[in-house]
Image (cartoon, rainbow, N blue to C red):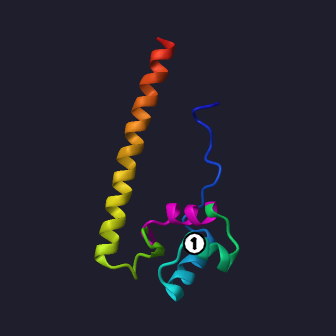
Amino acid sequence: MNATQPKLFELDPGDASIDRLVELLKTYGWLTRARISELVNWDDRTVRACVEAAPERLVSGQKGFNVTSQATADELSAAARQSIDQAKKMERKGIIWQKLAHAKVG
């Protein structure tokens, strides 16, 4: 496997799917990924890609997804903490795997 493989599913910040999700969430408020998929017939990757491409407009948290303009300060803070904690865990795993790879090649 190539360490520089391209990302398989990534959206441009101007993608129309993001605008569609923003409008949906402005109408309904917090929605789970499953509910979004029911409403617009998207798979999980499309929902995640929208949020990844537009974090200034879309937030994910314990309740699901929402637009940042409608989320409370507490909801945004909780989402920020969750995201930062997840990033720290991922970094720790990455460092461990990198050390294991280096040990295999000497």
For residue 97, side relative to residue 38 (left or right) = left
Callout 1 environment at 10 Å: few (<14), some (14 to 19), or many (20+)? many
Q: Position of residue 81 (x, y in %)?
A: 31, 60
Give the amino acid type for the residue marked by disc 1 in the picture: Ile
Picture quadrant where residue 96 is located = top left
Q: Is residue 4 above or below residue 83?
A: above
Residue at the image point whose x is 67% and y is 65% from the top: 43
Picture quadrant where residue 61 is located = bottom left
Q: Position of residue 12 (x, y in %)?
A: 58, 62
Quick one: 49 or 75, which is closer to the camera?
75
Q: Is residue 77 above or below residue 40?
A: above
Picture quadrant where residue 24 is located = bottom right
Membership of 41 in magenta stretch? no
Q: What residue would you read off at disc 1?
A: 18
Q: Residue furthest bottom?
A: 27
Q: Position of residue 6 (x, y in %)?
A: 62, 43
For residue 51, side relative to residue 69 (left or right) = right
Residue at the image point whose x is 46% and y is 19% from the top: 102
Extent of the magenta region: 45-60
Residue at the image point whose x is 47% and y is 79% from the top: 30
Helix, strand or loop at label 1? It is helix
Quadrant into which the N terminus falls:
top right
Membership of 57 in magenta stretch? yes
Q: Position of residue 45 (x, y in %)?
A: 62, 60
